[in-house]
Image (cartoon, helix red, strand yellow):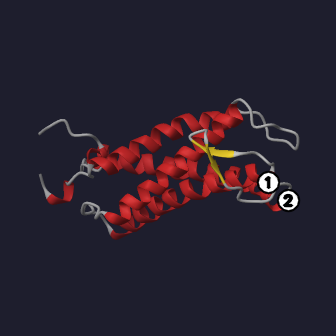
Amino acid sequence: MKTAQQPYNAVTRFFHWAIFILLLVEFPIAWTMPDVRRDTLPNGLIAWHIFFGTLILAAMLLRVLWRVSRKAPPELPMPKWQAVAARLTHGLLYLGFIVLPLLGWANASSRGWDVKLLGFIPLPALSPKGSAFGHELGDVHQAVAIGLLVLIGLHVLATAYHEILLRDGTMRRMLVSWKR
């Protein structure tokens, strides 16, 4: 195996695909849950949205800790603009999947809703109950979510370009290898 095609380690791959699966659940919940209004209670799909949002935040924080403690495999050879675009996109994805749940958490706190990790570990409020700023963060939360969907689309398209057209092994680096 060439050094440039060195795969990501198993923990990095686990975090990547675990977050992907959580997002496959979270985004449809977000799109189908009822609109949050002044008198809305955190029941049903809203409760599930909060549950998965805290899981995504926890997984992303663990992923960041893992990433800063481990060296990534060497980048594949590519034009400088592509390398810069890849680093920028990945950085924005990491940032977004931390900021997005924090915005939702602050919005939930401003509504007086309890936010719990795994559904039972209470987390502190990020904004006071009744906070107008906390309520406004709900709109920012929605805008960031849409921006992240666009970034995910770019990430998938770039991966497809590298894998299908360039055939440089980009996607295989993040897939489980069954070979020994």
Q: Position of residue 59 (x, y in %)?
A: 47, 49
Q: Position of residue 31 (x, y in %)?
A: 67, 36
156 w.r.t. 61: above or below? above
79 w.r.t. 29: above or below? below
Q: Which mark is residue 132?
A: 2
Q: Position of residue 97 (x, y in %)?
A: 54, 54
Q: Exactly how many numbered labels are in the figure?
A: 2
Give the quadrant of the C terminus: top left
Q: Which mark is residue 110?
A: 1
Front in this rendered view, residue 24 or 56: 56
Mark 1, Cα crowd under 10 Å, few <14 / some 14-19 / many 20+, is many
Which numbered disc, 2 or 1, marks the residue closer to the eye? 1
- Which residue is drawn at the image coordinates 50% and 56% (left, top)? 93
Distance between mark 2 and mark 1 Cα atoms: 8 Å
Amino acid residing under circle 2:
Ala
- Which residue is drawn at the image coordinates 30% and 63% (left, top)? 70
Amino acid residing under circle 1:
Ser
Front in this rendered view, residue 118 or 11: 118
Picture quadrant of residue 163: top left
Classify mark 2: helix, strand or loop: helix
Is residue 74 toward the left or the right of residue 121 in the image? left
Picture quadrant of residue 87: bottom left
Is residue 118 toward the left or the right of residue 15 in the image? right
141 w.r.t. 177: above or below? below
Q: Position of residue 105 (x, y in %)?
A: 68, 52
Mark 2, Cα crowd under 10 Å, few <14 / some 14-19 / many 20+, is few
Q: Is residue 178 visible?
A: yes
